[in-house]
Image: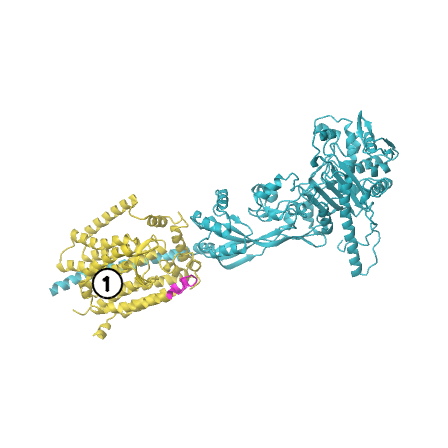
Amino acid sequence: MDLESIDRKEKLSAAKLHVSQYVVAAVLVVLGCWLWRLQILDANNYRVLAEQNRIRRVPVLAPRGRIFDRYGRLLVDNYPSVTCFLVRDQVKDMEADLPLIASGLHLPLDQIQTTLRHYQYAPKYQPIPLKQDITPDEQAFIAAHRDDLPELETLDEQRRVYPRDGVLAHVLGYVGEVSESDLNDERYAAYEPGDVVGKSGIEESYDDWLRGTDGSRDIVVNSHGKEVGQMGEELAAPGHDLRLTIDLDVQMAAERAMEGKTGAIVAMDPHNGEILAMVSRSAFDPNQFSVKLTSAYWRSLMQDPNHPMMNKAIQAQLAPGSTFKIIMSLAGLQENVAQNMKVMCNGGGVFYGQFHACDKHHGLVDVEHAIPWSCDTFFYTLAEKLGIDAIAKYAQSVGIGEKTGIDLPNEAPGLMPTVLWKEKVMHQPWYPGEVISVGIGQGAVEVTPLQLARALGGIASGGALVRPHLVFPSELSPDELEEIQTEYPGSGNKTIPLSPQNWELITDAMAQTTTPGEFDTAGMDQLAGIDFAGKTGTAQVMSHQALDRTNHGHDTEPNAWFVGMAPRRNPDIVVVVLWEHGVWGEHAARLAAQVIDAYVTEQRERARNLEMRVAVPKLEGQSIGMAGTAPSE
Amino acid sequence: MIRSRFRDFDWMLLGLVIVLSIISVLEIRSATGMTKFHGFQQKQMGFLALGLVGMFISALVDYHRLLGIAYWAYGASLASLLAVRLVGTRVLGARRWINLGGGVHFQPSEWVRLVLILVAARFFWEIIENGRDLSWKDIGKASLLIGLPLLLVLKQPDLGTSLTYLPVLVVGLFLGGIRWRQAAILVAGLALAGGAGLASGKLLKPYQRARLTAFLNPDSDPQASGYQIRQSLIAVGSGGLWGKGANHGTQTQGDFLPIPYTDFIFAAFCEEHGFIGAIGVLLLYFLILMRLIQNAQTAADPPGSLIVMGVAGVLLFQIAVNIGMCVGLMPVAGIPLPLMSYGGSSEIYMFVALGIVMNIRMRRFVN
């Protein structure tokens, strides 16, 4: 028994136990070799992977430049805002999380599902914007559910805040996410999906000036994407601030003048083309575009018959009516036709075998009286004498039918008909009789309010025409200025020949318009102590025959125009008012008077303040009664 | 009496184990410091203390007495596994624990392994004592003995723990005198059956199949099973020669490495202490295993050797599968790394098993 058991024991323990030592050694050596491979040979690869795991580059969005008026009053500002994104590669079963996300973010479930469907073919790593401008409690919700809803991410952004009630809406424009079609455009080469770009107005035309350069932050994250530290930071370069030529006081006066009406007001300094005010009504609220635009609001804008998205100051192309008579006078006088012309007005006249009416029996009329009386018969006759090509030559020389080159997108060129135009575009011969209605600014002539401001402002300035602009060229870099001028070509700065006598004649005649007495087409609109000149216009929106077939509703009423300026010669301000269906030009003149009054009052106020601050002698030469110019100008 | 016996207590083995346990506690501390599991190192120290107590107790009871009650214990083990099936607490979809109340959960499958080591030792001892060669009938009986609890655990489902029962059988057959021809037939048969089972797709649960697929091709599904292997490889590899330092493993601290305090603790350790640290731990395991085999060689009788070799076999298997998993050599099986991974049941099992080894060593001159 003992011997046996000893025998057995040795049988068990000898070779086999020895072998097992080798097995142990072999297994551990294999593991050790494998560790060598991973930790020594491939260590660098794995280090890179480990860094990629935990370091995430997040963009730091650069704030857009702010926008000010000419005196540094803030027009457009930014405010910090948080957007919530959905990152789909974080989770497998997103559908299950949606109800919780919906309740936490106060979004309807079906809206989230619609958004997801919209992005279903987008790459998985592309974050889907769920909700913009989320509230603090929604931010708290996301932070609290970091672990169970890792798919929710937030991004700090800056949002635009614009003036309320559509003030300056068309000038400033609005921003939005760059669209897919924009991205294919070469102009947007530097943009990436999700970038915010200017979509209209100044925001669009000066987008590259206003937008900064985004920076980035390398943050350390854990596997849930939660930020636990920071590695490096590339600072964002904020966009340039922009000072507009807009004078907020004048702008507000113009906004008040247009309240409840449709149309446009442009106020410009004809010395240099600085736009002082630009109103278009009806308007939209750019703040609605700042956060995600609701489709209901967009629909209401699109269906509004008054075209609230249209900047009528530069995009409405309408018959100028009698305001065109100034251009007619320019042509007639410079061609030495109008000087000695005397026309008998018996309430109209027969031209080319057809009777054309005048609104009054003006009797014997010369050009000095024809302008303030706005005598149609006189200008019918003048048109007949000049012919369409001579009229077109002068109209085109003051920029009718051509963009002015203002630094705003989508300016309309207007239209000046010529014989050639009729044949080429309309494929019809020019009928000599057509020139008669052109003579009073009807027919095919189409102008924008801004064109009128530039043209009549230029004539009142002795023929010096300017390129209208909203940003001081001196405050832009040469590159930016050149870019803007190439991007928005137009008639620009130029001087047309205008003899001093003719200049005096036209400007004096325009001053008569607003002077009570025999010539008062807009006599009630005179301003005490201000040399206020101008020309009314009442433009038919349809022919008398067509009008007879309608029910004479509001939208068949004539458009009321007024081009006003102060002082009469070398004016400091020219104001064009377009009051759609405003019936009479003198109605528009009243609005222009309010704007000019506000301008002069403000200039006087600023001059007084300046006088009080700095004891300098009174500045001379301001015939509209201002004692000085603005400090910054 | 006790005093004289403890003269032969394996203080060196205990020393090696304690060193490894300290490394474990420190790594658990580092891996959980930033998580909601921080403080687990203190619980682990508690388990360690309990384990040491269990070790000294089990060192005192003569292992022949344990062998005497082995079959009774085996019956009780089967009963406890059935009890888990019936009244066990379901955690993460598997019934593995019995709630003992007071927040204490007991995982019978760890203890069953110890019982299986004893039962196998007794089974093969009897064959050796009878002096006969291992017959196919013996092989069948042994397989049934181990296979029955293995299947019960597999059904919990707990593939990892059930697999750790296999080395008990393998070591038993090896030391019990299986012949080359028998072994070859057995391996071939198992390979065929396994292959057929895999092909039919019924052998593995879907998640287990996914783990296997992920192991074979880690990039197939970077977010699920492959994710764990991938993150583990990145952790180990990026550790480099010296490691990133305690509390500085980006994979471990950033929660990229899954469960870095239990199944993937070796990957966490490799990341923070590099190749040098990893080789150090492998060396400690090597010394522990060598010491165990030496104890088997010097055991007083075959059952003593069989028990020690059973413990060593299971330990080697667990090390190979767990570290193999961390370095991408093995699929994810859910086997903790003995003496390193956080966990009460496995820690206490390990120390009680070591206690029995001590027990055998202390009685090597007793006969």
Q: Percent from the top left, x then y, of residue A254? A: 73, 47
**Front residue (pair A106, A150):** A106
Bounds of the magenta segment = B27-41
Coloring scheme used: by chain
**Front residue (pair A225, B27):** A225
- In terms of secondary structure, where does tag 1 sit? helix
Which chain hosts label 1? Answer: B
Look at the picture and state if A1 lies above or below B90: below
User: Which chain: cyan?
Assistant: A
For the question of whether residue B241 can be seen, the reply is no
Query: In the image, is B265 to the left or to the right of B64?
Result: right
| Image hue for chain B | yellow
Look at the picture and state if A154 lies above or below A445: below
- Residue at the location (37% across, 48% down)? B217
Query: In the image, is A361 to the left or to the right of B283?
Result: right
Q: Percent from the top left, x then y, of residue A426? A: 70, 28
